[in-house]
Amino acid sequence: MLIDLKKLLAFVLSVMIICSCAACSSGKKDNEDNGGFEKIDVSKLPAKLDLRDLDGMNYVTPVKTQLFGDCWAMAMAAAAESSYLYANDMGVDAGKENKQVDFSEKYISWYVFHGMTREDVKVGRVRASQIGEGFDPSEAEKETPVISAIFGGAFVGNVNLFGAGFGPVDESLTVKGEKPYAYDDMWSGEWTLPQNAEYRCADSDAILRNVIKLPSPAQHDKDGAYSFDQEGMDAIKYELNKGHAVTIGVYSSHVGFGGKSRHVYYEGEDSVDHAVAIIGYDDDYPKERFTRKDTGGDTVKNITPPENGAFIIKNSWGLSGDPDDDGYLWLSYYDQSIKTPLSYSFDNSKKAAHTARNIDQYDLLMTQWYATVDREDEFRMANVFDAEEDESLFQIAYMTTQPKTEVSYEIYKGIDDGDPASGELLEKGECRHTYPGYYTVDLADEYKLRKGDKYAVVLTMKHTAGEEAVYSEVFPYSTQIADGIKTRAVVNKGESYLWEKGSWTDLSRMIDTHIDIAFEQIGNEIGKKERELPIKLDSKDTFVVDNYPIKAILAESK
């Protein structure tokens, strides 16, 4: 048995996730010289790009002002807005403000930190079997009612929020004649949202497609030594050229960040404490512009990057009133604090086969982490669902956690109890994912399901670890992230199954073993950084494990 103890992307203070892109056998296969995985052709990338002026069109919304510790929601909403505008051909003339969409940061931060209640249950969206799953900040809210906005968030929760069909929601949306999702002053009013299906399952035509976890240009070895990663820089630029804005975590508590110079370059080992969105780049941006003078007029040491080149980042600190402050900053390619670049893509809602969708799913924990178990022998994971109404299955979605992952999927209908791979095989296929992450797969056909039909989505994941190919099991887990914020996962019998050595085992019978795995992985990887993270590592009692992150996406039958 091989247990993968690789770094688990543990950025809880402001950034953390695992995400992906895909090429599937039902579509066109490219890059066969790269094993079927997508390979970036750097020679075709332009030397500069700005989503505020891409072919004369602006796909970036106005700069906002965060109210407290919700930069993570700000950055995610900013990237989602630009990616959505681009996907839906909603640019405006460059130089004009694009206010056609305004995704609610309040919606994001509130529902990430508030789990499922009985009132949240809605056919096709939230199953009654998952009541109680997620975070419960009620104790913390007695002292600090706006804890969900103050507490540093994790991008992974946001992605699972959107992937679960919760948002992004526009702030202009009305419910009962009011605009509950507006991002207003949390201190002047009741900064809350109801925990029920009418508000959580709000209408939105923003359909999340993929979230790609890209390699970072700033790499650090186990001793903290920095090295520049060209692949990371190229990957970010490649995604921007596809109209996908990118969120990153950075270190902002230094004089250069947000200063009058508008130029950011940090050389050091401090932790990520802020999140921003990348909306452009310039390979030739002069490194000398990052140089600063101290009060005595001398050049500050270690403040000039080694080479030219910078990203354009959209910040969330509003405008200072300085005539040179437009809310955007230049971030050197060589900034040593850049962490966890995430690229967001959306479907064109006008061209989508279905905009009103049901999602069969059990992973509603809004977790920070996904554990990976690697074995030489074949693993298969499966989620079993019963159709809650007459509907058509047309997509599946899932998470991967390793680069260059091959996924084989099978879909069965009319299965026997305890055997997800029985009954009628509706479809099977293969996908290759260059980077880890969340993504959606279009099925070759739409499959009619009658209310009560029992069906299963079965996945086999495989990637290369060292010199050998290994099979992977991936499952979400979480732990107590702060005093007064509880977390609960709900895994019932008959929902998720693991196949190994020729037989299926119900995941509900394996929870203790999986908690042991999750506890060992996170302890080995971030034990010496425990003081920096708002988690409890003193006991496995604070750990919970959720169902497999496998979703079935359906359209209501007409």
Image (tube, rainbow, N blue to C red):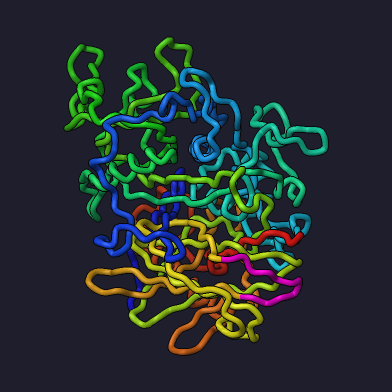
Between 117 and 377, the one lying in front of the other is 377
Residue 123, quarter of picture: bottom right
Residue 44, quarter of picture: top left
Q: Residue at x 58, y 85 (%)?
A: 422
| Magenta stretch encompasses residue 453 | yes
Q: Residue at x 46, y 26 (%)?
A: 57
Quarter of the image for the C terminus: give it: bottom right
In the image, taking residue 300 as reference, residue 427 lies left or right, namely right
The secondary structure that most of the magenta stretch takes on is strand
| Magenta stretch encompasses residue 557 | no
Query: Residue 2 at what x, y percent from top left?
Result: 33, 76
Q: Residue at x 44, y 35 (%)?
A: 276
Quarter of the image for the N terminus: give it: bottom left
Whether residue 367 appears in this view of the structure is: yes
The residue at the far top in this view is: 323
In the image, taking residue 413 as reference, residue 474 lies left or right, namely left
Whether residue 7 appears in this view of the structure is: no
Total marks drawn? 0
Q: Which residues are magenta?
A: 445-455
Query: Residue 101 at what x, y percent from top left?
Result: 60, 32
In the image, taking residue 557 as reference, residue 140 lies left or right, namely left
The residue at the far right in this view is: 176
Query: Residue 533 at what x, y percent from top left?
Result: 44, 50
Query: Residue 390 at what x, y percent from top left?
Result: 75, 67
Q: Is residue 222 above or below residue 247?
A: below
Between 111 and 553, the one lying in front of the other is 553
